[in-house]
Image: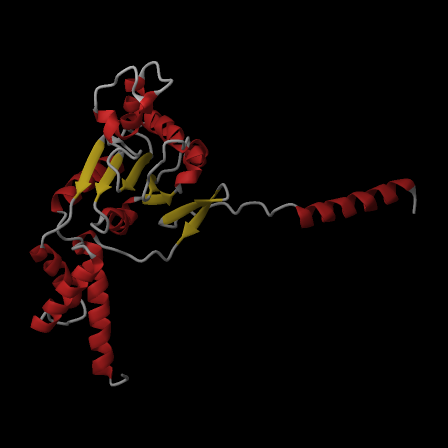
Amino acid sequence: MNLSESLIARLEQLVEQAHRVLPPLPTPPDFDAPAFIWQNKSLISVYSKQPVALSDLLGIERQKQRIIQNTQQFLAGFPANDVLLTGARGTGKSSLIRGLLTDYQQQGLRVIEVARDDLAHLSQIRSMISGRPEKFIVYCDDLAFNAEDENYRALKSALDGSVQSNSGNVLIYATSNRRHLLPEFMHENQPVTRTDAAFQGEIHPQESVEEKVSLSDRFGLWLAFHPMDQDTYLDIVTHWLNKQNIPLDEIARAEALKWSLARGQRSGRAAAQFARHWSGLKLLENSGLK
């Protein structure tokens, strides 16, 4: 074997070793998929998300109408706002996003779910989908930050950028149990004195308070969700039971109310969970397998 053949053989060995050590190249995303998860700096296509239709979401008609209108503007290429959905747990915030995807996927809507700790990658996500004909909602679920968390600055920057691209193909929809996304304290609503220990070292303490509310201010549309009354809760239970041809009789009604008491809430989530429990129980009894 001459010198050149030996060198080529050595280079082939090095390439093979590198292939074993280096991670595989990321697979290009399939933009025919309805949804994506941002993971390991890649868009992972998701095909099997459990569908939720907007017509299945009851008791939140005002919130539903406003987010549908905003999304229709977005899909039509007209100016639209980033959206912050806040309020009580289990009241339909996340389900509303999934319902939009179910109803508007055929019109080119896509959803990219991004974890809070990956918000620093928003500019990279924008670059990957720039020029695509689809319309993308970047979705951040259960968003909240602590006082030391710097990820909110990345989100603030992305929201500022989206103001300049209202006619583009990206909006940010976020859900949170907190109205202002950062913890707030009683002393922040009191007049500040020079000796206030909570603000020691702060030359302009009011600016720290303004910093906390500035993030939510960058969302153009705020939608608030509240705990529901008993009648609405039972209407939702009835809706889901009807899908299995199971009536809400007096026994089922009493059990549904006990279920909500045990959960400590009357919400769409609790209603759907009870309906799943009760319909499964009745279907099992009728099957003769129990």
Q: Nearer the viewer, residue 57 or 90?
A: 90
Residue 31 seen by the camera: no
Q: Is residue 269 above or below residue 148?
A: below
Horizontal and vertical percent for residue 205? 31, 18
Q: Is residue 276 left or right of residue 257?
A: right
Q: Residue at x 25, y 26 (%)?
A: 188
Horizontal and vertical percent for residue 93? 24, 46
Q: Is residue 11 left or right of residue 194?
A: right
Q: Is residue 135 left or right of residue 1?
A: left
Q: Residue at x 36, y 38 (%)?
A: 133
Q: Residue furthest bottom?
A: 288
Q: Quadrant of residue 128?
A: top left
Q: Quadrant of the C terminus?
A: bottom left
Q: Nearer the viewer, residue 93 or 29?
A: 93
Q: Is residue 152 above or below residue 199?
A: below
Q: Residue at x 22, y 49 (%)?
A: 92
Q: Nearer the viewer, residue 64 or 5?
A: 64
Q: Residue at x 79, y 43 (%)?
A: 11
Q: Is residue 56 above or below residue 26?
A: below
